[in-house]
Amino acid sequence: MMGQHDRSEALFYYFRLEDQIPENHLLRLIDKHISFEFVRLQLKDSYSETGRPSIDPELLLRILLIGYLYGISSERKLVEELRMHLAWRWFTGLGFDQELPHHSTFSKNRHGRFQESKLFEQLFEQIVLQCVEVGLVQGQHLSVDGSFVEANAAKESRIPRQQLAEAAQVNQTVRQYLVELEQQNPVEEPVHQQDQVSTTDPDSTYATKGGTPARLGYYDNYLVDNHSCVIVGVQATAARMSQETVAAQDMLTRFAAWQGREPESVAADTTYGNGEFLQWLADRNVTAYMHTRDSALRKNNPGYGPERFTYQPESNSYRCPAGEQLNYVGLNVRNRAHAYIGSAKRCGACSQKAQCTTGRYKYLAIHIHEPVRQRARELAQTPEFAKAQRQRKKVEALFAQLKNQIGLRRLRLRRMKFVREQFWLAARCRTSSAWCGSSAGKQHRWLSTTRIPNGTRQSLHHPATSPSISDFFNTHACFRQLSPPAC
């Protein structure tokens, strides 16, 4: 006999939210292993001791964290979903009879207390320090990379820099931007000077990466521990390739201070293979697993390269394969290279001239950091380099998670200070997952409705196992990998 369900609503319901949330739910794990009590201590001086009680800042932070965990970028949409979601209400501690915060409350606190106290940055740093203290992060072999994230501004919003003062009369964002420029130290050079500036987001940079059409955006830079795939450094910069190495140095310096020692190696792509960054790593005895950035002239030059010439320190000169001497003529400041040249007389009569150069005489440019560049080329032929480059792909998986799951393919907030907030919270979600997984002590299953491939049940604590790239798209798969072996 076929049954029929009568759709009816009871007048009262008797149940506890605590009983409805599974023990292995993502939010229950975060609530169990991560404390948010420091938020109130951090913001204590930002509130008056008298007057009407405000909304608990820990509550606001928990709601924001839910948005980044489940890829809801709109705060208005987040509050609407929170009204209906049992697990989210349980995580925030809001009962059915309690009023939800208005969506404008988040913007008010973001522009005020949260920004002034650097809460989001300290929130990320706290969880990284916890990962270092429990040994989840080994910190020996790291990878660094940056990804272009589109700004919340159209390229049509750009105007010539000379017209900013005129635009400031009717545009509040431009007025604020000009005021901030006047407050900056005039001795410091700006990070980048664009001929045209967006009136919607003046801090964004018009750039492209990976052959895509030029857009306004920022770079999100990650420093990742290869062993656990935990993000140990994050920094927002202008979308300029030169800023990637600057961000890498800042992140490596902070992380070395946290763990009390320098890493053994750093892997990166060719963008980071300039002489200055390679020398910076060599000064700290850090092995650089990255290809060198060579000029197009050097890569396409059919003649003899610098490796075919022998340096003579007593005379500061080079000797060519034919035995002729190339004398030092000075430093090319623009190319950051020492120049050595032969003579038209000696080179013209040389039997190897056709293989050496197409000019009247040989011009040899030696980079000021050529020894470390040559060392990087030698390391590129080793098995350790190939292994480090394979592990570096984990950073790409994290950027894919950032854009596809967390929803930061295009930024929602504008201006650099609010872009940093989005990058810090997104990285905090990923790092929190690894921290909870290391403390969970058992394996977990994916209970969300999101269609994400399941990962393997391997443990990062076992030296013979390593996680697959696909597992880093799955937060619960991370729990399975990071859980210690069962006794």
Image: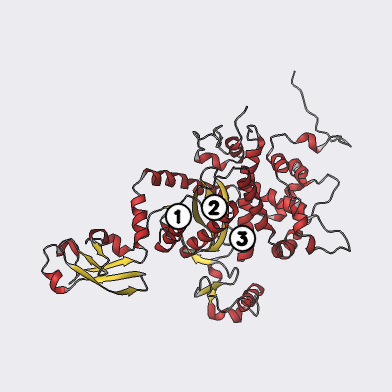
Q: Which amino acid does label 3 sit on?
A: Arg
Residue identifier under label 3: 420
Point 86% across, 34% down: residue:
14
Residue situated in front as seen by the camera: 356 or 338: 338
Discs 3/1, front: 1
Residue situated in front as seen by the camera: 155 or 296: 296
Q: Residues at badges 2 and 3 in contact (C-beta under 8 Å)?
A: no
Q: How many labels does the image show?
A: 3
Residue lying at the far front of the rendered structure = 314
Residue identifier under label 1: 285
Q: In the rendering, at what x and y percent does residue 425 appear?
A: 64, 54
Q: Which amino acid does label 2 sit on?
A: Arg
Point 41% across, 58% down: residue:
273
The colour style of the image is secondary structure
The disc at residue 261 is 2
Is label 1 in a helix, a strand or a loop?
loop
Of callouts 1 and 2, the N-terminal one = 2
Is label 3 in a helix, a strand or a loop?
helix
